[in-house]
Image (cartoon, rainbow, N blue to C red):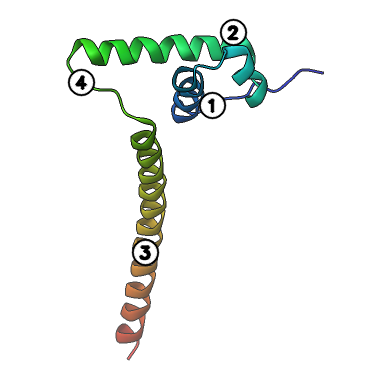
Amino acid sequence: MSRKRRSFTTEYKVEAAHRVIDSGRSIAEVARELGLGEPLLGKWVADERRRVEAAAVHGEAPLSAAERAELLRLRKQVAEQEKDIVFLKKASAYFAAMQQNKTGSS
């Protein structure tokens, strides 16, 4: 029986990598905690360290843990609001059509 391949969001990968980078804990320890393979988490940590170094080279500060958390929260909020907007557009179109039917049938 084959295992289904899991996929992870970029946000999850960055957050997992920062659990290692920010805390100073080992990759093995964090990988066990998250139920991930060490090589996979190690790759994420290496990628994130490269990203942080690249930001430093350009004179930019990488996001702090609080800023990352706020960014995640805001992204979730935007996604919810986008769903609400889609729903409201459909509801508006529905009620406009209903209004047209009322005025057109008189």
Observer-nearest residue: 100 or 1? Answer: 1
Residue 65: mark: none
Q: Is residue 34 left or right of residue 106?
A: right
Q: Which amino acid lies under the numbered mark 1 shown in the image of this protein?
A: Phe
Circle 2 sits on which residue? 39
> Which residue corresponds to the image point at 40% horizontal and 47% vertical from the top-left?
79
The earlier-in-sequence mark between 2 and 3 is 2
Q: Secondary structure at mark 4?
A: loop
> Which residue corresponds to the image point at 67% horizontal and 20% vertical from the top-left?
32
Asked whether the beta carbons under mark 1 and mark 2 sit within 8 Å of each other, the answer is no
Crowdedness near tag 1: few (<14), some (14–19) or many (≥20) residues, C-alpha within 10 Å? few
Seen in the picture, residue 64 relative to 73 is either above or below; the reply is: above
Circle 3 sits on which residue? 88
Q: Residue furthest left?
A: 59
Q: Is residue 35 visible?
A: no
Q: Secondary structure at mark 2?
A: helix
Circle 4 sits on which residue? 60
Q: Is residue 26 visible?
A: yes
Q: Secondary structure at mark 3?
A: helix
